[in-house]
Image (spheres, helix red, strand yellow):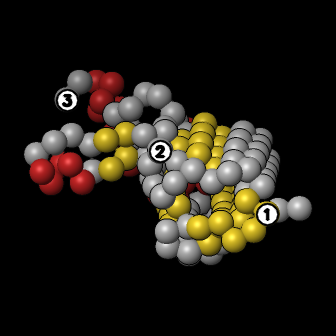
């Protein structure tokens, strides 16, 4: 392990609990930014929301635009570790959440997904594919049920 890797792991150990368990949204936003997540102004992150940013990746794997609301206990994943179980490497794919999106409680977003502007993702949904702008999606997997007016 080189010095750079050591510091990434050390900061991850310190910042990840703050990013998930911080008492205020502003602390959770700050800690996630420090971990390398690209977060614009006016973003609200709920308690127990996990945003994946692998410490070994210098590039921001999750991009959250302005005005986004991320509900309680959300999971936003930027990597798939299932190939590791088969002797392969992790697969990293960028997640983009565009302006004014609202994610209800307990939403899971899988790697490589883009959620369009002003979309709404209902509580408990699992987002496996891109969501069009101004669309309401719910369910497992998330499917469109309407448009935002």
Label 1: which residue?
147
Q: Position of residue 113 (x, y in %)?
A: 52, 48
The relative height of residue 7 versus residue 104 in the rendered view (above or below) is above
Task: State the residue at coordinates (82%, 62%).
Answer: 148
Label 2: which residue?
112
Q: Cβ–Cβ below 8 Å for labels 2 and 1?
A: no
The relative height of residue 79 versus residue 21 in the rendered view (above or below) is above
Task: State the residue at coordinates (53%, 61%).
Answer: 127
Label 3: which residue?
1
Mark 2–mark 1 Cα distance, whole angstroms, equals 23 Å
Please state the total of marks drawn on the protein image: 3
Foreground disc of the pair 2, 1: 1
The reply to whether residue 16 is visible in this rendering is no
For the residue carrying disc 2, how many other residues have a C-alpha within 10 Å: few (<14), some (14-19), or many (20+)?
A: many
* 98 displayed left or right of 48: right
The relative height of residue 38 versus residue 124 in the rendered view (above or below) is above
Quadrant in the picture for the N terminus: top left
Q: Quadrant of residue 82?
A: bottom left
């Amino acid at each position: 392990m080189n010095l750079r890797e050591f510091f990434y792991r050390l900061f991850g150990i310190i910042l990840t609990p703050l990013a998930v368990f911080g008492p205020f949204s502003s602390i959770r936003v700050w800690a996630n930014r420090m971990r390398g997540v690209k977060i614009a102004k006016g973003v609200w992150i709920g308690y127990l929301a996990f945003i994946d940013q692998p410490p070994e990746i210098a590039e921001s794997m999750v991009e959250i635009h302005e005005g986004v609301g991320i509900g309680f206990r959300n999971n936003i994943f930027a990597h798939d570790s299932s190939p590791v179980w088969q002797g392969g490497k992790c697969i990293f794919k960028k997640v983009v959440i565009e302006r004014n999106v609202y994610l209800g409680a307990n939403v899971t977003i899988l790697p490589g997904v883009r959620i369009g502007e002003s979309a709404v993702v209902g509580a408990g949904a699992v987002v496996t594919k891109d969501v069009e702008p101004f669309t309401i999606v719910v369910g497992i997997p998330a499917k469109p049920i309407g448009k935002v007016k």
